[in-house]
């Protein structure tokens, strides 16, 4: 019998955290050994609303949690500043981080990659766990070879902290690998209200929409002579992310470097 993968989840009370806990319960080869929650140190999950019967210890301090529970993997679903500290602390404790939290800087990604490689540990930072979103990004990268003019519109719920979204930023980076930098729009274009034309990556634009009712949506629009090509993905429910989380937890046990983006580990 293969051994179970022992997992700690940070951000358990959050929208993504709750789904990740269900994934643990429904996956026989995963075992949730601890939870990180800055408000409920010392309790067990079963003492919180919505986690009936789950006798999992809660910690606010990662070092204590790792020392007591000896996990293989940390899944982080918190906020940008905390997610970065959690990923770093995990690697320093020989625990492999699967990070869904978005909003990391380029410097933070480089630092975590160096740390993972120094320690020969797997680490995955996945701006989007949904397979449809990965395909949207890959197809956008393909299309960018033929269209230089592109605008990314990412749309999320209004509780989101980071803008642009991790997915929007990753899409722009993937397109940049194919597209010759080009300043889009009219040469003399002027914003009469700052920000009207969106964020700029090598002359391509990213627009962030935040509205109640949305979950996670993105469309990538390519314009050419007399034509428009639009690639769109919608996550209507956070269950859409969970098969990707599962693949990450399984894969991270077999790699010894940091992978940024699920597209790099899917067959
Ligand atoms: N990669 C992907 O596919 C996806 C990534 N995300 C990302 O995942 C992250 C979480 O999203 P979501 O679940 O919607 O957000 P929520 O706001 O619903 O959940 C965040 C959770 O993190 C907790 N938290 C905040 N600070 C700390 C801390 N210092 N220590 C421990 N826990 C902390 C919050 O607790 P409290 O409420 O008490 O502050 C809350 O329970 C975001 O960065 C989001 O962008 C989201 C969806 C998909
Ligand atoms: O905050 C969210 O909700 C999401 N965050 C990720 C992102 O920033 O791209 C993934 C998904 O879009 C949902």
Image (cartoon, rainbow, N blue to C red):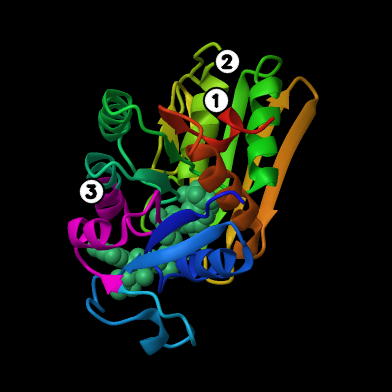
Q: CA distance from mark 3 to mark 1?
A: 26 Å
Which disc is residue 179 wearing?
A: 2
Indicate the position of residue 37 as horizontal and vertical percent values: 29, 70
Indicate the position of residue 228 as horizontal and vertical percent values: 76, 31
Badge 3 or badge 1: first in the primary sequence: 3
Instruction: Mark 1 vs mark 2: give the one in front.
Output: 1
Mark 1 residue element: helix
Q: CA distance from mark 3 to mark 2?
A: 34 Å
Identify the residue at the far top of this view. Answer: 180
Question: Viewer-proximal residue, 9 or 68?
Answer: 68
Which disc is residue 174 wearing?
A: 1
Mark 3 residue element: helix
Indicate the position of residue 267 as horizontal and vertical percent values: 69, 30
Question: Viewer-proximal residue, 227 or 71?
Answer: 71
Vertical side of 9 occupied by 72: above or below:
above
Which of the 4 quarters of the picture holds residue 24? bottom right
- Tell me the crowding category of disc 3: few under 14, some 14 to 19, or many 20 or more residues within 10 angstroms, Cα based: few
Is 126 a magenta residue?
A: no
Vertical side of 175 occupied by 32: above or below:
below
Left or right side of 15 for 84: left
The residue at the point 33 percent across, 57 percent down is 79
Badge 3 or badge 2: first in the primary sequence: 3
Which of the 4 quarters of the picture holds residue 147? top right
The residue at the point 30 percent across, 73 percent down is 58
Mark 2 residue element: loop
Mark 3 CB near ligand 1 (8 Å cut): no
Question: Viewer-proximal residue, 85 or 253?
Answer: 253
Pointer 3: what residue? 85
- Tell me the crowding category of disc 2: few under 14, some 14 to 19, or many 20 or more residues within 10 angstroms, Cα based: many
Instruction: Mark 3 vs mark 2: give the one in front.
Output: 3
The residue at the point 55 percent across, 38 percent down is 251
Q: CA distance from mark 1 to mark 2?
A: 9 Å
């Amino acid at each position: 019998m293969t051994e179970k993968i022992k997992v700690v989840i940070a951000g358990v009370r959050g929208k993504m955290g709750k789904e990740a806990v269900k994934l643990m319960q429904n996956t026989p080869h995963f075992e949730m050994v601890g939870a990180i929650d800055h408000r409920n140190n010392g309790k067990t999950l079963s003492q919180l609303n919505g986690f009936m019967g789950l006798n999992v210890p809660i910690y606010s301090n990662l070092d204590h949690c790792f020392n007591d529970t000896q996990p293989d993997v940390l899944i982080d679903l918190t906020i940008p500043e905390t997610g970065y500290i959690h990923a770093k602390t995990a690697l320093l404790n020989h625990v492999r981080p699967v990070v869904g939290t978005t909003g990391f800087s380029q410097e933070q990604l480089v630092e975590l990659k160096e740390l993972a490689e120094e320690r020969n540990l797997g680490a995955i930072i996945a701006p989007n766990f949904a397979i449809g979103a990965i395909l949207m990004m890959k197809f956008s990268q393909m299309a960018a070879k033929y269209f230089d003019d592109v605008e990314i519109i990412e749309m999320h719920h209004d509780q989101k902290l980071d803008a642009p979204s991790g997915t929007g930023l990753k899409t722009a980076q993937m397109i940049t690998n194919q597209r010759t930098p080009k300043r889009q729009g009219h040469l003399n274009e002027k914003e009469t209200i700052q920000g009207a034309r969106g964020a700029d990556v090598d002359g391509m634009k990213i627009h962030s929409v935040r509205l109640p009712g949305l979950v996670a949506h993105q469309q990538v629009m390519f314009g050419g002579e007399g034509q428009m090509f639009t690639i769109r993905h919608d996550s209507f429910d956070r269950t859409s992310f969970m098969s990707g989380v599962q693949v990450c937890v399984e894969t991270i046990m077999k790699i010894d470097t940091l992978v940024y983006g699920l597209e790099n580990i899917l067959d």
